[in-house]
Image: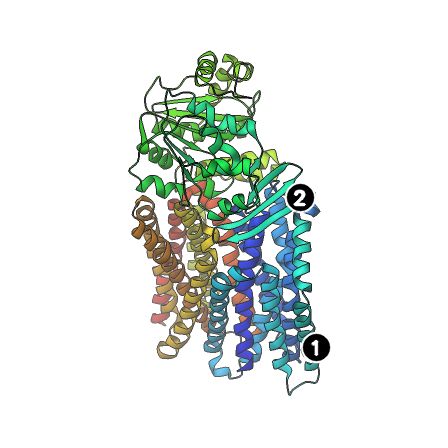
Amino acid sequence: MGILFSIFLIGFTAMSLQIIILREMLVVFYGNEISIGFILGSWLFWGAAGSWFLGRFSDKVKSRLFLLSLCQLASAFLPVLSILAIRSIKTYLGLAPGELIGFIPMALSSFFVLAPICALLGFMFSLGCKIYISNPADRARDIGLAYGWESAGAMLGGALTSIIFVRCLNPLIICVLVGLMNVAVSFLLLFKRDKRAVFSLLVFIAAVFLWLSGTWKSLDEHALERQWEGYRILGAENSVYGNVMVTRKGRQYSFFDNGLHLYSLPDEQGAEEAVHFALLQQANPQEVLLIGGGVGGLAGEILRYPVKSLDYLELDPLIIKMAARYLPDEEYSSLRDMRVSIYNLDGRFFLKSTRKKYDCVITHLGDPYTAQINRYYTVEFFKEVKSVLNKNGIFSFYLSASENYISPESGEYLRSVYLGLKKAFEEVLVVPGDNVCFLASDKPGVISLDYRLLEKKSREKGLGLKYVREYYLFSRLSPQLIAYTEGVLTRKTGTRLNYDFWPSTYYYNMIFWAARLGDTGFKDILKGVDYRRMIYALWAACLLIVIFGFFQLRKGADPYKNISLMVLMSTGFSVMAIQVIVLLAFQIIYGYIFYKVGFLLTVFMAGLAGGSFWASRAMERSGRPLDILLSVIFLLCVLTLGMPVLFSRMAMTGNAVLSAIGADVVFPFLSAVSGLLAGMGFPAVNKICLKENNRVGRVAGLTYGIDLLGSCLGALASGIIFIPVLGVTRSCLAVSAVNFSILAVLVFARRKFLAT
């Protein structure tokens, strides 16, 4: 029973650390969801390497129990070192806090930081299987049960970490707590068997002493200060929506959300530019909606006008609370104005559910570095804004650009937004500059870029602006600059529009920032995998799968091992691709994946455990693993075909109850089902492979490694290529096409099996 508990703890440790490390890396990688692909891909790659390559030696080791005990000790310390390494990434790369990190450094950082702990956990599973399995007659069942116990541990670790630990403890302390569990199991494995168990006991006592003395807490604070070197940290807190940091440098206060810079105060010029180009267009704006930016000074600028009400949307209430706590009164006082109503709601949901009409809607969310922000630049969002505007209403927002030269990458990125606006609104005008201001209205003639008219309105309203005034307007709104910018945006180049489930602007923005940050290699990869090439590559992959399968079936010897391994890799690929698609679709629809990522991964592992336990028992009755694999692939085809329909229904609803059902029932259900199917396939493949090779450690390492390698490819392909290039719906169809190819091979394999 002790070895089963050790395998259970391997899963518990892996999932707890995956959630903590994922959250920590999202802060370093400014919340960019493409990093999820890098992180999960690296995690699974090294897990596969540890299981597959190191696992080959588990059959040759004599003191297996002692070696597993040492591995448990190592797994207690490596997580702490991993957290310290993650927080030092930007320091080693010479980047300032809040500065964007390039995609290549992002990938390399994930790859090398995760290598030790992930390879160790993968090896521990193979070693644990070899120790646990003693009856040769039940090898396949026992490997499946070990896989199930590991998955059950992952389920519990994910549940405790995402629901309790992250709310009560800081990340480093969570790692220490999980480490203490591993030290305790290390002791129990050798207790009464080996005198060296006393070493584990001493390590446990020392770790507890360091905890009680506050050493671990001090180390966590030191690592945090190193991560934000050069800034005085006023407050750093986690909410369900993300990590919020408030810093001070001289007189300037800065807010960061998941490591991404939100606002710096005071910034009068930025606030004036964001507000007055829109509000100067109207004679008497009464009802204004502001999505983001109120804490950054925009609310105060809007209240210079005699507005009747200002509705300010900020998803995370922690941002408001920390602003009230740390900002000087003169910077926060505008939010106490009686005309201001603060709503801690998702902007997309608010627009779908409100019946109120506005004279002006201003969004201040920054560039779409992430899928979360990109959802505020889609055609669907623009139409939602249009639905809440009055007849003469105006919509306004800013994006990064360049005043005198717009590069091809920047032009395509801005063009995708401009064309989307044109699809929703009758008139769209653009204010050129280092930050391009987009102005849109559904009634022609409402907006103007005549600097003399805007200056006249400013004087008549007595605004007393410091920056948006005559000399500034004359320069910013020169006919030459306007003509140049409009020429770039209206150029015919085949630029795709940005939709919720085909986030083209997100894709173009990645290319733009890869070029700007010097990631020319990654930029070339992204530009090279365009839509048509992806479709051709997909058809080629499906054809190769069919050719390989039928070639194996024509061989005289037993072909089922190679086919089953291909099915296992395909299942790992498909299930992890589904998981990443689910995570990003959740982000696109609801906008707070940081809150749900731990829970969705937990229910995935619950499904994995349930599927593994069920399949292990089912094979004892039927003895036909090919039937199980056939069922798994068929259900994967059905799941991937049905997911786009569910996503579109969830995206359209403005009903709070239906929205909650989607977030709390539908998406967890999809994660659980994909995990269930992955769990069902693993024991079946082991049953087939053990017919040819009775080396349990090698087979367990091979199959676990193949499973993780396929999962690694699925995480990388879906997160980095599929969704940006193909979009959510076509990504689901791509995964479905791969599984239909596998299904065809399995149908003929089953026929041949029955015939013999």
Scheme of colours in the image: rainbow
In depth, the one of 712 and 665 nearer the eye is 665
Q: For the residue marked with disc 1, what is the amino acid? A: Leu
Q: 211 or 666, which is in the foreground?
A: 211
* Quadrant placement of the C terminus: bottom left
Q: x, y percentage for residue 683?
A: 45, 71
Q: What percent of the width, then of the height, locates residue 608?
A: 43, 66
Give coordinates of residue 265: x percent, y percent.
58, 35
Q: Can residue 547 be seen in this view?
A: no
Mark 1 touching mark 2, by CB under 8 A?
no
Secondary structure category for the residue under label 1: helix
Question: With respect to residue 696, does 305 lie above or below?
Answer: above
Image x and y of residue 557, in percent:
47, 69
Give the residue at mark 2. 231
Mark 1 Cα within 10 Å, few/some/many (few <14, many 20+)? few
Against 501, residue 194 (above or below) is below
In the displayed structure image, the side of residue 363 where residue 213 appears, left or right: right
| Along the line of sight, the residue nearer the viewer: 404 or 621 | 404
Q: Is residue 358 left or right of residue 109?
A: left
Count of numbered labels shown in the rendering: 2
Earlier sequence position, callout 1 versus callout 2: 1
Which residue in the structure is indicated by mark 1?
202
Q: In which quarter of the image is residue 259?
A: top right
Observer able to see residue 183? yes
Identify the residue shown where x is 48% and y is 58%: 598
Residue 52: name its quadrant. Answer: bottom right
Task: Quote the CA–CA distance across marks 1 and 2.
Answer: 39 Å
Under tag 2, what secondary structure?
loop
Amino acid type of disc 2? Answer: Tyr
State whether residue 496 is above or below residue 161.
Answer: above
Asked if 546 appears above or below 296 in the picture, the reply is: below
